[in-house]
Image: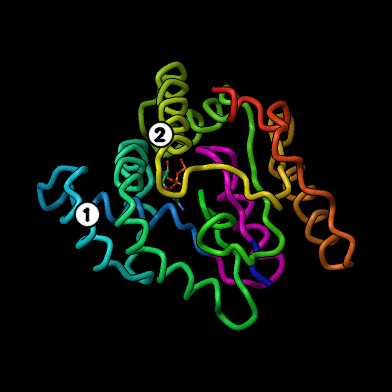
Amino acid sequence: MIIAVDGPAASGKGTLAKKIASHLGLPHLDTGLLYRAAARALMEHGHELGDKDAAVRAARSLSLCGLDENELRGNEMAEAASIVGAIPEVRAALSDLQRAFACRPGGAVLDGRDIGTVICPEACPKIFVTASAEVRARRRTLELRARGEEADYAAVLAEIRNRDARDQNRSAAPLRPAKDAIVLDTTELDIAGAFNAALAIIARYQSGSPPRAAPPAAPSRLDPLLRS
Ligand code: CDP
């Protein structure tokens, strides 16, 4: 079983994917770490984030076991990852690693932006996690402060909107729900509520009666993702 968990910044997709994987005994890959690690390697070597050749070299040199989540978290790296992730050749260079992880015997849970649309179109189920930009900014502000970083809510909200726009409008693998994804709006849900909702979705797939995917034009359900 390959489970794709996609969604915008601070939607809770990482926490949710981790909990689903642990509940089902499946390995989990946070694909954002790959983009963050590529960005970090560029910065360490003094390259511009838009330097395509250096970015592709950095992406090709990555391996899954060298990813240190603690070093790669943080706002600066998220912004840098979003710039590097807009380079189509970088995405191509990182796709084999992600596919190989997804195709492990027994399955896997991957979270990111394009798991359901590009990396694993065969994934089932595909859950697209979203929440209002304001709620996501509140969550991210608290998360950054808990990590000891300074975080101003208004600045975090502006960054999230900026990153949403970049992730949605890039030419390569733009952020959007796959046609057969189930949209899970966590604006009003806490972690336990989102987890229970995701388990219910997975159970429906396992029992052979999957819930209906959101129709493609349902902007209110993605609010404010597709309207921003
Ligand atoms: O937790 P958050 O969503 O803020 O960060 P992340 O998932 O680590 O992603 C950081 C950035 O990496 C995103 O804004 C995307 O631009 C990029 N990314 C991507 O393009 N494709 C992925 N599969 C994962 C991340």
Q: In the rendering, at what x and y percent does residue 57 appear?
A: 19, 62
Q: Secondary structure at mark 2?
A: helix
Q: Residue at x 31, y 37 (%)?
A: 76
Residue at the location (70% across, 64% down)?
Answer: 124
Q: Which residues are magenta?
A: 4-28
9 is within the stretch colored magenta:
yes
Do the residues bearing badges 1 and 2 touch, measured as CB atoms within 8 Å?
no
Q: Image point 29% across, 46% down: which residue?
A: 84
| The quarter of the displayed image where residue 116 is located | bottom right
Numbered marks: total = 2
Q: Residue 204 at x, y = what percent?
A: 86, 59
Picture coordinates of residue 78 (x, y %)?
A: 37, 41
- Which three-letter amino acid code belongs to the residue tagged 1? Ala
Q: What residue is pinned by disc 1?
A: 55
Q: Which residue is mark 2?
A: 166
Location of residue 100 in the rendering, given as x and y in whole percent from the top left corner:
47, 75
* Three-letter residue code for mark 2: Arg
Cβ of disc 2 within 8 Å of ligand 1?
A: yes
